[in-house]
Image (cartoon, coloured by chain):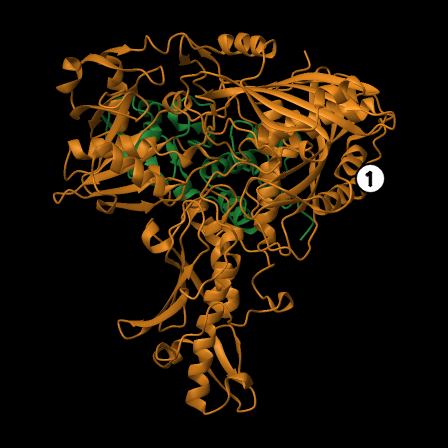
Chain colours: A green, B orange
Amino acid sequence: MSIVLTVNRRKRTVEADADKPLLWVLREDLDMPGTKFGCGAGLCGACTVILDGQAVRSCQTPISEAAGKQITTIEGVTALPVGRKVVDAWIKIDVPQCGYCQAGQIMSATALLTATPKPTADDIVGGMNGNICRCATYVRIERAIREAAGLETKA
Amino acid sequence: MSAPVTAPETAGAALTRRSFIAASLAGGAALTFEAYVALAAGPGLPDAAVLNAFIRIMPDNTVIIGAKNPEIGQGIKTMLPMLLADELDVSWEQVRIEQTDANEKAYGVQVAGGSTATPTNWLPARQAGAAARAMLVSAAAAQWGVSASTLKTSAGRVIDTAGGRSATYASLAKAAAAQPAPDLATVALKKPAEFGIIGTPKSGVDTPKIVRGEPLFGIDTRLPGLLHAAMVKCPVIGGSLASYDDSAVKSARGVVAVVPISSGQCPAGKQDAVAIVGTSWWNVQKLREKLSIKWDTAAQEGFSTELYAKQAAEAFGKAPDLSLFKAGDADAALARAAKVVTADYSYPFLAHATLEPQNCTALWHADGSLEFWAPTQNPGAGRKDVAAMMGIAPDAITIHMTRIGGGFGRRLMNDYMVLAGQLAKALPGRPVKLLFDRTDDLRNDYYRPAGWHRFTAGLDSSGALVAFKDHFVTFGKDGKALRAADMPKSEFPAPVVPDTHLTQSFLDTNLTTGWLRAPSSNALAFVYQGFMDEVAEAAGTDLASLMLRTLGAPRDLPSERPGVVFSTGRARAVIERVVSFANWTGKPSSVPGKGRGFGFYFSHRGYFAEVVDVTVADGAVRVNKVWIAGDIGSQIINPLNAEHQAQGAAIDGLAQALVWQPVVQEAGAVQTVTFSDFPLLRIDAKPGDIAISWVTNDYPPTGLGEPTLPPVIPAVANAIRAATGKRLRALPLQLA
């Protein structure tokens, strides 16, 4: 079927089966490989994108459910003011190790800070616990979120 | 206590006269230095000079430095060029880093494993940079008619202070190419106080691309006409394909071919997977359920987790299969000991669970050559595996190295290259990307093997450790441990206890085993330092004190690795550092449910002593803080990445201790196939704080990908003992 969706503020039309997950539409049909495949079961968060303001697992989102919606991916996240701050903090603190999960981490952090601009430690766990980092960059993920939120006092 | 090799070992990096640097002008403008370094011969090392490094100085004075090792998040792509750039005396901002292809003939060993890159490259990489600098300085000296010794360099310029002039490296390119090349072995190197890049924090070179979502990883490989493949792999490792019916798939929309292939795990000449190749991975992976396949798994169906546990218990009741190390008479010494301590420890099979599932892209060319885009930690081994399986010449294989979404040792094995190579050959001229789904990935790992240890220790009346026995039940065939199922003869405290006996018994398995970050050490640290904590308790002391007493005076003890010794003095220094740094008293906490544990381990040339502070409440363990004292030699090359590696490895160890669940096998097949079955540590279990203190000395720098990990596992187990009185002797640590 023909589906129209808005990805990073650009209207896109794709021909895809209704049950094809948004993840694979992004990677295969729209040539946007920044969103990552990790488990295909919504358990690791590597495929997180923002759909109408909410962080969702794109591997669990059939493209039919994304039709007509606003989607932001890692490739376009810096167009959001909060996303810009998150990405800048990620670079400043040099969060990544292997880097594979970081697109998903950045999308979840952006959604978290959009909803909760000054998150507590519990808020950060609540917003980020769906995203696995196998290299365990969690110390720096927490710091970068606090940095983006203007909560880091240390240089 | 030194871990077995995970990569070809280099005995230091001594230079011979066959080492040299060559300069040339590429396209008449860019000055290229290629440093060929003959590394001391060692197992697996070519006895020839290899291109250790290349440096290219561009007309705009940008400096391109080749990064030759696979990048799995260990930071090597940033760190090796730092060594060259510092001695070349350019500013880091001028440097651009280029990933080289895999080409062992040109570059020598290109492996991400065994924490070997730092000790192997520390001197040669610096010598290459220094020699290139010397040629640029000579060129300027000749041009200006002054002595080279009056000139200095900074930020990619040669400076003549007396003459009030300077020249960029780029402007000296032509003249430098004509200068005689200095001897790499004797070229002057910077003194540590003169380092400008080494020892300063540098961000990962790919960080800006990662946060933009740029295609960097193997899974992101994009090529014109790319086809996608999903496979149905035999659910039982070692089993093979009996028959299959693809009639419901072959004609389906978007399918190009159905191809039976072999991972190399089944008998030669057979296949153990059927791949569907088409225009969309999503589409072909969905079609897998329409394949009808019969497998031959009769020979493997008897293997199960339950069987291994039963066999291990039986093995403890029988004489060991072989004696690994014997000194004195342990039984006699135990008979006269004032106190005897005995305990059984065990740990399960584990998967690696890299977040990027295994994948590989391959293209078969009309001339019979094969090209790979491979996220592999060990391209040289992949080349050999592919050549052997497909009957082609190793030289006919080109390997491009992609960034890798997690290695942890899984990608030292190259089954995905072997599988993808066969698919490419079946579809000549079309690049094919094979991607495992998560179940394929967890079910077809090269698992950290399970193991069981029965320990007995004897103390004399003064509390000194005088007798020691370990009966280690592991996996092996024909009297030899399987890959990563071995234990060194020199496992501490064996070399220092007068009456010692280490023995082994072997179980059979169909599972493929392999190296998991800090292989062998991740398991042996837990069982040895866990048991030593019990011995300390029986001796009326704490583990840090018992370790210092047992280590004795500073001296070198032999290890099985060529060129590696275990220095008891260096071990003492990190233990003493963590004791003072963490205010370790060895006394119980006054707060109920709170406790601290200690662990020490030497692996991959690194000495690490760690203290873990936990609170146990309602059956849950909360890690409040980890203190790490580490010795990896004279210089922390990239302090930022060193912190990343140490934090990550410590949390990785805590995950193995507290979060990961055993890989379970029934009727030959692994049943642990999702992240629900094999949970990974999430941010909620992050330790409250991780404090790191480096002990530096005059020893050459060594690697840091692995040695932080092992001691944290016994330290957390020992902390739970201190907090609750419960002694947990099996991984994962479970209170209930």
Q: Residue at x 42, y 22 (%)?
A: B442
Please indicate whether residue A123 sits to the left or right of residue B60 in the image: right
Q: Residue at x 35, y 73 (%)?
A: B59
Quarter in which the C terminus of chain B is drawn: top right
Work out whether B340 lies above or below A98. above
Please indicate whether residue B87 sits to the left or right of residue B230 in the image: right
Asked where in the image residue B667 lies, by quadrant, the reply is: top left
- Report whether residue A26 is seen: no
Q: Looking at this view, is A113 or B523 the one in front?
A: B523
Q: Chain of mark 1?
A: B
Q: Residue at x 58, y 38 (%)?
A: B648
SS at circle 1: loop
- Report whether residue B196 is seen: yes
Work out whether B363 lies above or below B516. below
Callout count: 1
Please indicate whether residue B538 sits to the left or right of residue B89 in the image: right
Pointer 1 residue: B583
Asked where in the image residue B587 lies, by quadrant, the reply is: top right
